[in-house]
Amino acid sequence: MSGTYLLHPAGDSQFHWDLKSGNAQTILSSQMYKAKAGAESGIASCRDNSGDEARYTRMTSEKNQPYFVLKSGNGEIIGTSQMYSSEAARDKGIDSCKENGPKAVTKDGAGK
């Protein structure tokens, strides 16, 4: 089963998306967008950039938990991962993002 982008409202006037793997685990989460069109552009950017290893930055939180961010060619953050229990688990998350991101379909929970 392939991954999906879940586009949904966040509060009264913002939008957000999550990239989910085939087993429904969240791989990557976006920032908040003021307009649905902005969130849709973020999904398009994720599709375009997620297959490129050079777009990933591996990081560690203040609590020493590994995670990653996906950036566009201009250095803007497209999405941030969950916190992982190990660097190996984080790297598997990146592999999942590379596999699912370019071809995932969008499920629109945001309405029109």
Image (cartoon, rainbow, N blue to C red):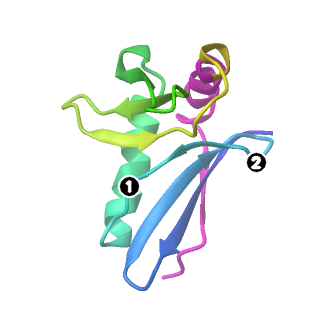
Judge from the rendering whether residue 44 lies leftward or rightward of residue 94; answer left or right: left
Work out whether 48 lies above or below 16. above
Front-most of residues 33 and 50: 33
Q: Which mark is residue 24?
A: 2
- Tag 2: residue type? Ala
Give the x, y percent position of residue 107: 62, 62
Residue 86 in the magenta stretch? The answer is no
Give the x, y percent position of residue 16: 46, 63
Label 1 sits on residue? 31
Which residue lies at the image location 73% right of the left edge and 39% below the top edge? Answer: 2
Q: What element carries label 2?
A: loop
| Stretch in magenta | 90-112
Judge from the rendering whether residue 56 lies leftward or rightward of residue 81; answer left or right: left
Give the x, y percent position of residue 37: 34, 67
The label nearer to you, 1 versus 2, is 1
Residue 97 in the magenta stretch? The answer is yes
Q: Residue furthest left?
A: 74
Which residue lies at the image location 45% right of the left edge and 31% below the top edge? Answer: 61
Q: Residue 49 carries which label?
A: none
Which residue lies at the image location 41% right of the left edge and 32% below the top edge? Answer: 69
- Tag 1: residue type? Gln
Front-most of residues 14 and 51: 14
Work out whether 107 lies above or below 93. below
How many discs mark residues in the rendered view? 2
